Amino acid sequence: MSGSTWQPGQLLFVGFSGLTVPPDLGQRIREGRVGGVVLFKRNIADPEQLRALTRKLHELAPADAPLTIAIDQEGGRVQRLRDPWTEWPPMRTLGGGPTQDTSAFASALALELLDAGIDLDFAPVVDVDSNPDNPVIGDRSFARDPATVGRHAAAFITAMQDRGVATCAKHFPGHGDTDLDSHLALPRLELERDRLERTELPPFRAAIEAEVASIMTAHVLFPKLDPKRPATLSPEVMGMLRAELAYDGLVFSDDIEMKAVADHFSVEDRSLGCLRAGVDVILVCSQADLREEVLAKLERAPDQLLEHPLRRLAGFKQRYGKTVRVVPLTEAGPPFASHQALADRLRTSPVAHDQVAHDQVAHDQVDPTERS
């Protein structure tokens, strides 16, 4: 599997509407001009339908450029697979307990994803929840201190990847201290470098040490590092990840449809600008017309801009998602009784109950990353 022979569109991961593959997207996958698909609850009806959908998506892709199917399945507010799948508690319930519970959680979650034919989970959140007024992170974070976040993130990553499902640490270099939702506006954090070293970066270092398969960027402006461009588009911020944290793995942009970048930057900036900064894969989670516009720009991009991202993506796909892996755990499929029992125990444990009660946020019933 050689990234140098792949279509530039492999660096594009996309979403779509509906329960079946749209014909135009199916054609792009068949041509090898899309590298991955991101599923949302709008794509999911029940286990049988989801297995059929992921099987079809995998089968459409060329044998030498397998499709990656991704999902946001964190637990709590952000989980696309709900009843009859396991209803998992938020990561905050895990941060106050032993890392063995986090490992058990991630391992069980991975089995459900494998059962559904999914290769990549956009989890864990490794942002430190340092701002109680943050409208988008809150109980999605393991804790309010970086050491705890790092320990539990490493346990999650190791357990899930040992099952064969790739993970993604998000949102680099840190979304935890913002007071704006980057889906709706461009957050700005006036953080000095020493503050980042103390609080935001340690969990990412722990994730990298745990050999996390991928990292996702934050659409957040850090003026002390780059006064004009948010992290996703900033060579200064991404250079910190690549050079100082020595991470040569796959990096995803957050969705470039989000208002934090869509309201301020052109399609050129949000596509090739990502690659120039050091990002490898661009997410377009809804709009087919934007998908086509980004694809056209990728296919006209100079080879030197595509070389390293395609190499990293090839390494990622070599390890995850080489074959169609729909692995039913029972004839009836989900729900998995032992998993729900685990989720219930984690949710009702005294440590978890006290932690969530202490850190409760008013928006905890809202999924901040779902798109219509």
Image (cartoon, rainbow, N blue to C red):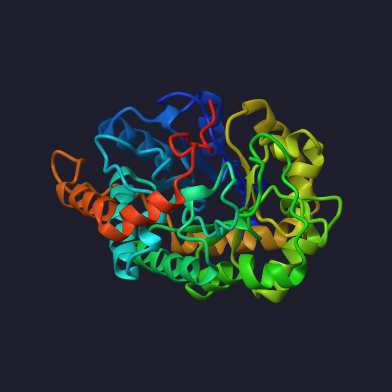
85 or 33, which lies in front? 85
Corner quadrant of residue 333 = top left
Determine whether, in the image, residue 278 is placed left or right of residue 226.
left
Determine whether, in the image, residue 173 is placed left or right of residue 212.
right
265 or 163, which lies in front? 265
Residue 303 visible from this viewpoint:
no
Residue at far right of view: 227
Image coordinates of residue 54 in percent, x first then y, are: 38, 39
The residue at 56%/60% (across/down) is 128
Residue 175 visible from this viewpoint:
yes
Image coordinates of residue 62 in percent, x first then y, are: 49, 46
Image coordinates of residue 204 in percent, x first then y, are: 57, 67
Determine whether, in the image, residue 270 is placed left or right of residue 113.
right
Asked if 1 appears above or below 269 in the picture, the reply is below
The residue at 29%/64% (across/down) is 101
264 or 353, which lies in front? 353
